Each structure stands twice: as C-alpha cells, then as structure tokens.
C-alpha cells in the first residue's frame, strides 16, 4: 500500500518533503545552538570588559604613580640662596676670597647634605675681570656630587627624565674693593624622596 | 529543548549578563574613586612642599600652611592629625604619613631646625637657627 502511495506521490513531491525535513532539522539545530551562540557573544563581551577595565586600571595607576618632580624649583632656590650670600647689592662678599671662607656656614647650608653621593651639587666660580678678559678663575667653591655637573650639561641639551634639574646664574662686574669680578653659579638637584616603612 | 525552556534560558542568561555588567562597572567606579583618595599622592605633595618652604625660609620664620584636604583623608583613615607630619632634624628630613606602616620622606638642604605644629586645619612650619 505504502509503495503504491509513494509511487503515486511522484519524484518531485518526495524531493520537496526531503527538503522540508532538512530545513526543519536545520531550524531545530539553530534554535538548539542559540545558547551556544550567546555564550560565544558573552565571551567576547567579557573580553571587551577586560580590555576596558584593564585600560582604566593601567591609566589610573600611571597617573597616580607619576612622580611630582620639584628638582628644578629646588635647584633655583639653592641658586638664589648662594647668590644672596655671595653677592650684596652689586658687591662681592668681602670674605669670599679669604682662605678660611666656609661657604656652607656663610650661606647656612647643611654640609652633610652635600657629601659625595648626595642628591645635590653646586659650583661657585669666581673670575677676575681684570685679567684675561675675565677668564681667569680665581676661586672655586663646590659641594655635593660632582657627577651631577656633567649630567647637568647633558640634561640641558636633551630631554632626560632621570637626570638632575639644574639652575645657572651669572653675576657680572661685581665690585670687590677696586677690582671687578664675575661669578658663575651652577646648581643641580636630583633628589628623589620616597616612601619608607616604619 | 522546547520553546518555553529556550525562553527561560534566554531570560536567565540576560539577567546574569546584566548583573555581571553592573558588578563590573560598580567595581570600576569604586576602584577609580578609591584611587582618587589615595594618600600617597598627598604624602608626597606635602612633604615636598614643606621641604621647599623650609629651604626658602629664613630663621625665626613661621609659615602657615592649610592642610584641610590631607586632614579629611587622614580622618577617613582614622589617623590622628597630630601624627601626620613629623621632622627628623638630624637627617634634615620632612616626613608625612597617612598610614601606620610607612611615611613619605623628603630632605631639605638648609642648616635649620624645623618644628611642625598642627592646629585644626593649619600647619605651622617653624624654622629655627640650628644650634650646635
């Protein structure tokens, strides 16, 4: 009986039925796999959240861990302190050329902060204008780590983050009795500071 | 799986998805807010500021500094305002601490003794000539 019906349906109808069965199967599979598809979407979403979250965390950490660098201001302060005690209204400090002149005591600077390996450096050079067109170095005072002097010249020509910040000043034709002097001051600071555990 | 089962799963998944998103963004906002209140930034700022004031000052000078913002953070952390600022005159070191475990230290280079006194929202930086 069945074979009769099948034979009576014809080849075209059988084919159509097969196609319908295949499409039903495909739709069922699609609905069945819908959850799998959403899981895939969720994984992408978690990935996107991780990227966003990671970006925010890294950005905030970079912002708050950025160092507040005050070395430049420090160098300027020290420079002006040295200038104040060496120069007085266009006159050179009258004791500065004495053999026993103590620049630390005179300028009230703490000597222990300017030992070798310290974070500070200063150099005060006094030139006599009367000789060799003011190029005769008469006296030089310095304190701190001399390595910073070279770093100052490097740091002045290129952008160097870890290098000391420096300050320079010149005082020209200062009177000292009947002579005239030039004073050059170079100051560098590379103090870092930091958190210390109790 | 019948249609109702699929629908239930979809709703459940949507709820989980929304909850996870809320948890994530709440966490982010909390993190950024907490980071904004981090004391170490204030410790560094105040230590450097005080050191620079001392370097710029002259003996017998008293400088008043407003400390309202760091005081608010210290109070949140349960730290007494009197214990935020300290000085180690033997090392020329200004210390600022908002925690019990560590402090931020910064040195000044002038040969002065320094005394720090807090009075409500003000910090007195007393600079003295060093004797001996």
Image: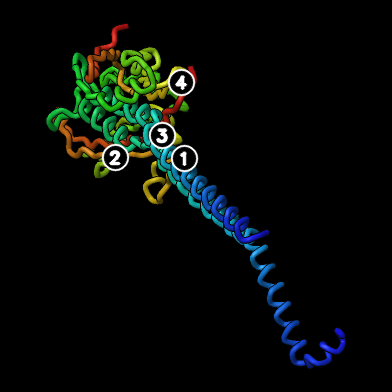
**Foreground tag (2 vs 4):** 4
Rendering coords of residue A62 (x, y %):
44, 43
**Foreground tag (3 vs 2):** 3
- Mark 1 and mark 3: Cα distance apart in space: 10 Å
Choose top left, top right, bottom left or bottom right for residue A27. Answer: bottom right
**Foreground tag (4 vs 3):** 3
**Foreground tag (4 vs 1):** 1
> Label 2 belongs to which residue?
A168
- Mark 2 and mark 1: Cα distance apart in space: 50 Å
How crowded is the residue under tag 4: few (<14 C-alpha within 10 Å), some, or many (20+)?
Answer: some
Q: Earlier in the sequence, mark 4 or mark 1?
A: 1
Q: From where the camera sits, is residue A130 visible?
A: no
| Callout 2–callout 1 Cβ contact below 8 Å | no
Marked residue chain, label 2 = A
Image quarter where the N terminus of chain A lies is bottom right
Any mark on residue A129, and which? none
Rendering coords of residue B93 (x, y %):
37, 19
The residue at 24%/28% (across/down) is A81
Q: Earlier in the sequence, mark 1 or mark 3?
A: 1
> Label 1 belongs to which residue?
B27
Looking at the rendered structure, the secondary structure element under dot 3 is helix
- Mark 4 and mark 1: Cα distance apart in space: 27 Å
Any mark on residue B102, and which? 4
- Mark 4 and mark 3: Cα distance apart in space: 19 Å
């Amino acid at each position: 009986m069945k074979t009769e019906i099948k034979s009576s349906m014809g080849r075209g109808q059988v084919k159509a039925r097969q196609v319908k069965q295949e499409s039903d199967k495909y739709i069922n599979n699609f609905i069945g796999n819908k959850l799998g598809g959403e899981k895939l979407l969720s994984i992408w979403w978690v990935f996107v959240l991780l990227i966003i979250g990671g970006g925010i965390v890294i950005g905030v950490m970079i912002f708050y861990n950025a160092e507040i660098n005050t070395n430049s201001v420090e160098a300027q302060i020290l420079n002006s302190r040295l200038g104040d005690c060496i120069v007085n209204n266009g006159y050179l400090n009258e004791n500065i050329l004495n053999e026993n002149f103590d620049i630390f005591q005179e300028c009230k600077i703490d000597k222990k902060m300017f030992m070798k390996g310290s974070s500070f450096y200063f150099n005060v050079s006094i030139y006599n204008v009367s000789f060799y067109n003011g190029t005769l170095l008469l006296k030089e005072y310095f304190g701190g780590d001399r390595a910073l002097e070279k770093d100052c010249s490097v740091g002045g020509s290129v952008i160097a983050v870890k290098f000391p910040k420096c300050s320079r000043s010149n005082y020209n034709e200062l009177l000292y009795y009947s002579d005239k002097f030039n004073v050059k001051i170079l100051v560098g600071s590379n103090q870092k500071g930091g958190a210390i555990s109790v | 799986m019948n249609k109702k089962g699929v629908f239930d799963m979809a709703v459940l998944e949507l709820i989980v998805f929304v909850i996870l998103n809320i948890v994530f963004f709440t966490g982010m906002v909390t993190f950024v807010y907490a980071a904004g209140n981090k004391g170490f930034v204030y410790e560094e700022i105040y230590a450097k500021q005080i050191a620079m004031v001392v370097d710029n000052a002259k003996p017998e000078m008293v400088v008043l500094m407003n400390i309202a913002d760091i005081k608010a953070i210290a109070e949140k952390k349960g730290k007494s305002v009197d214990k935020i600022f300290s000085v180690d005159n033997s090392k020329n070191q200004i210390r600022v601490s908002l925690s019990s475990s560590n402090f931020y230290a910064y040195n000044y280079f002038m040969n002065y003794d320094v005394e720090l006194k807090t009075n409500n929202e003000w910090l007195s930086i007393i600079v003295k000539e060093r004797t001996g």
